[in-house]
Image: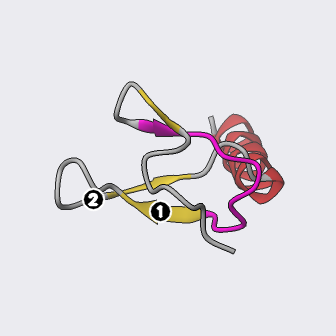
């Protein structure tokens, strides 16, 4: 399900937080290139937790 307005959920033009949007990876419309992750999706936080766990174990 996509949001009705593509600008809904953008914070400061760089961070995206929209709990109603089920996508995890979102293309940045402002810059024309690049991607960001939806901070309103629980799987984004699971991904970040795994990355932090791996970094802590390695360092």
Q: Is residue 23 left or right of residue 29?
A: right
Q: Secondary structure at mark 1?
A: strand
Q: Nearer the viewer, residue 56 or 23?
A: 23
Nearest to N terminus: mark 2 or mark 1: 1
Q: Is residue 20 magenta?
A: yes
Q: CA distance from mark 2 to mark 1?
A: 9 Å
Using the image, tell me which numbered label, if any, was put on residue 26. Answer: 1
Magenta stretch: helix, strand or loop mostly: loop
Residues in magenta, as a range? 15-24
Question: Residue drawn at (78%, 59%), measured in percent from left and top?
Answer: 43
Q: Quadrant of the N terminus?
A: bottom right
Q: In the rendering, at what x and y percent does residue 48 appear?
A: 69, 46
Query: Comparing marks 2 and 1, which lies closer to the viewer?
Result: 1
Report which residue position mark 2 lands on.
34
**Label 1: how many residues lie within 10 Å, few (<14), some (14-19) or many (20+)?**
few
Farthest residue, direction bottom: 1
Tally of marks: 2
* Helix, strand or loop for disc 2: loop
Image: 26 above or below 14: below
């Amino acid at each position: 399900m996509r949001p009705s307005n593509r600008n809904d959920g953008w914070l400061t033009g760089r961070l995206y937080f929209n709990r109603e949007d089920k996508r995890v990876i979102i293309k940045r419309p402002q810059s024309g290139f690049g991607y960001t992750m939806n901070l309103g999706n629980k799987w984004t936080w699971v991904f970040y937790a795994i990355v932090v766990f791996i970094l802590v174990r390695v360092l």
